[in-house]
Every structure is written in structure tokens, then in C-alpha cells.
Amino acid sequence: MTDLTDELGTDEIIRSLASGAPTTWLRSTGTEAALPDLGDVMNSAAARFDRFAPWFAETFPETATVPAELASAFPDVSGGMIESALVPAPAAQHRLDGLFGAEPGGRLWLKRDDSLPVSGSIKARGGFHEVLEFAEAVAAEHGLDALDPATYSNREFRAIAANHRIVVGSTGNLGLSIGILSARLGFAASVHMSADAREWKKTKLRDHGVDVIEHAGDFVEAVEAGRASAEAAENTHFVDDEDSVSLFAGYSVAALRLERQFAAAGVTIDEQNPLTVYLPCGIGGGPGGVTFGLKRVFGTAVRCIFVEPSQAPAMFLGVRTGRHSGISVQDIGLSGATAADGLAVARPSRFIGPTIGPLISGFAAVPDEVIRAGVGVLHETEGFDVEPSATAGLTIPWRMGDAAARSATGVHLVWLTGGAMVPGDERAAYVDHGLGLVERISSPASAIFVD
Ligand SMILES: Cc1ncc(COP(=O)(O)O)c(C=O)c1O
């Protein structure tokens, strides 16, 4: 551990984080905090997705009909929906009870954003939304009917779009979402990728005609380079993952959908049956947007816990110290490196911590071995495979000590955030590695702090 300054060194939670140990911090204040006034961004983003549903259904045939697992929650939707299933996971729960030798109670459910259509990760929600918002602005600016989905398939719009560029910096999945959708709408697109980004993500984007710019540095550097390249350029929109309300609004729509999914499954969420949600966190936009939406929908009946790799707990550190983007994990001697490439972020969003921080009920940091083992547990028990970033939250109900018992009558919802696009050989390697670690998933135990 590096020498911490006095102020940081006296905080036992920061000391635990800085040692790289698995750490859980549960806050009693989270659920009562007032929602920030951001206007009605969630409903306006939901309306935008609805407007584009016919375009999605036509452009991506896999979305043309609503899949069976979503039909009961969305009987009124005919197609073009970017949504994932909500599924109970009794086998995984039973296995984890055994591995941890403890039963937190409640019921384990999984949100399957690992298989969101088109780009296979939670980033589709925010990334698609920002691209669609930009497309509407460009259409309106050129006198086209921005609210008519047919506009986006006609030649006139595509000719205009070809003259506009969308730029983003990404660890991989946001770039994939933005790049694929931009290209389909006819926009030029540039994705600045950090060193952590997987090779197959770059290849896939290039196959879509997207310009991929590789950076030897980390995510913050990739974002900086993207921002700088967009600044002076004409007709160029920079998607700022560190500071975007449009991304955030897109993520929040998940909450409206989840409300309907729980209702369709006959699951009540209220004060007596609380919902605890475990969200993998990188820069914080995805989990921040989802948290904002969930608080709007479920109020004090929901608690959101952000989960990060123990070498890259950027949001945890930013919120705990109150320094937000003014502190990086390297400042406390951590490397920022992790096998969970989507979570390889050393410095948190400028926007999420200050705005959403008070709504977050807890933070957890877990080592890469635990994250990797989660891939093995899901393969073994539920029979599907995700990428490592997705499983960060899987063990947290078992890493909350007595605090988990508060939800003994409730739902533990582990948000699985990515995986469907991973190529077969890489997926098989994740599974092999994960299966080898399953028996060790409960160790080391987490240091648990409650305040
Ligand atoms: C699979 C996966 N999960 C979670 C996240 C975290 O999202 P955010 O960086 O918005 O916190 C990412 C980010 O890229 C991701 O790719």
C-alpha cells in the first residue's frame, strides 16, 4: 500500500480499499436522499425508444418480434424493443448459499442485459439513446420530420448523416453500441479505444465501417483523445461518457421496463418486500442512470449497490472521499487494472458521483478471481455465459453480513451487464477459467462497513 495522506489514512474504509481487499460499504442514508432535478429525462428517453421501435424492427430483424420471455410484460409492444429478460436464479442462489455457507435469504433474480439485442451489453441502453437523440436533432435541423421513424431509412437522411460524425472514447462496449448504431443510421463514427479494450470489439467495429483509434493508455486517455479530436471538427458530436445526460437518460429507461417485468412475474416490490440491486460500475454512467430510474419508480423500496473490481474501485473512492473525479485509484496505490475490461476505470464520472452519489445505498469492491469465478457459477448452475464484468455483483448478497438479512423477504437483483457478443473461443476461455475458481469464490471474505 502507498502512503496515504493523513486524511485518507484515517478512514478505515479507504485503508481497506487501498489494501486491495474485498470491501463492502453499506450506507444508511442512501434510500432517503432526494432525487436530483433533471427534468423528465427518463420518460422522454422512453418515448424516443418507442418512436424508433419501427426503425429498429426494420433495421435489425432480430428485434422484429418481442421474444417470448418479454411478451407477458409487454403485451402492447409489437417489436423493435431493446430490452432483456428478468429471470429467477434459484440454482445459482442454492450453489452460492453452499459455497458461502450462509443464506442471505430473499430470492435471487438476474437482469439479462448481457443479451440485450444488437450490441449485447447494458451500454446499448445509453449509447443507442444518445445516437438516436443526435439523429433527431440532425433531422430536425435539416427540415426533415424527426418524429417519423421512416425518415431514418430514407436516402435524404442518410446523405445528410454521412456528413456528420459521432465520436466516443470507450473501454469497448460503449464504443460497440455507439459504433454499430451510428453506422446503421449512416453516420461516420470514430471510437477511441483504451488499452483494455478487447481485440474482437475493435475488429467488429471495423467490420461495420467504424474508425477505431487505439490508445496505449487507459480509459481516461481514450476519452480525452476523443474529446480533443471532436472539439475543432465540424458536424461532429462527441459522446462524453464522463458527463452525458443523454446516456444517463437512456440507461434510466430500464427502470420503467423492470417495473412491468416484476409486475408480470407477480413479484411485489414494497417496503416489506424490498429490492436490492447489484450493479457493475465502471465510469458510473450505466449504474447511475439505472439507479436514478429505479429510485423514481420504486422510491425507498429499492437499494442500489455499485460493484467494482478491487483494483479499480473508482466510484467507491470518489464518493467515499467526496473528491469524485478529483481522485483516482492510483492515488491510493491501486493499479486500475482488471480482467473485467468494462470496469477498468481509474477515475469516476464528473457527473454521476455528485448527482447520484446520495442515492447509492452501498459500494462493494471484489477481486478479479471472484468476478471470474462468477462466470463459472452461472455456467454451471444457470447454463449461460457472460463476460467477466457482468458478474461483479453476483456474490455481494453474500458479502453484506447482517445487512443482507434486511432483505430476507425481498429480491436480490444481480444486473448482468454484458456477454452476448463475446466470440466463442473467448467465451470458452472465460468459462474454463471461471470454473476453475468456483470453489474459491467465497474467499477472501469481504471487510464489511456499515454507517
Ligand atoms: C459489461 C459492462 N458492465 C458494466 C459496465 C459499467 O458501465 P459504466 O462504465 O457506465 O459504469 C460496462 C462499461 O463499459 C460494461 O462494459
Image (cartoon, rainbow, N blue to C red):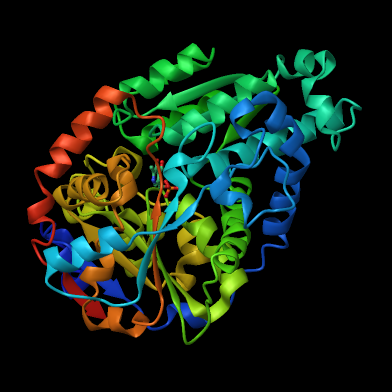
Residue 289: give x, y in percent of width and height. 54, 56
Residue 33 seen in render: no
> On the rendered structure, is 374 left or right of 249?
left
Residue 47 seen in render: yes
Q: Does residue 256 lie above or below 230 as drawn?
A: below
Which residue is drawn at the image coordinates 67% and 54% (left, top)? 74
Residue 310: give x, y in percent of width and height. 20, 54
Q: Quadrant of the N terminus?
A: bottom left
Which quarter of the rendered image does ligand 1 occupy?
top left
Q: Does residue 113 lie above or below 303 as drawn?
A: above
* Location of residue 7 by image quarter: bottom left
Which residue is drawn at the image coordinates 22% and 78% (left, top)? 449
Q: Quadrant of the C terminus?
A: bottom left
> On the rendered structure, is 115 left or right of 182?
left
* Location of residue 161 by image quarter: top right
User: Depth check: 96 or 15 in front?
Assistant: 96
Q: Residue furthest bottom?
A: 272
Residue 178: give x, y in percent of width and height. 55, 31
User: Depth check: 451 or 371 in front?
Assistant: 371
* Location of residue 339 by image quarter: top left
Which residue is drawn at the image coordinates 34% and 59% (left, top)? 89
The number of discs equals: 0
Which residue is drawn at the image coordinates 27% and 72% (left, top)? 25
> On the rendered structure, is 138 left or right of 317?
right
> On the rendered structure, is 374 left or right of 353?
left
Residue 184: give x, y in percent of width and height. 64, 21
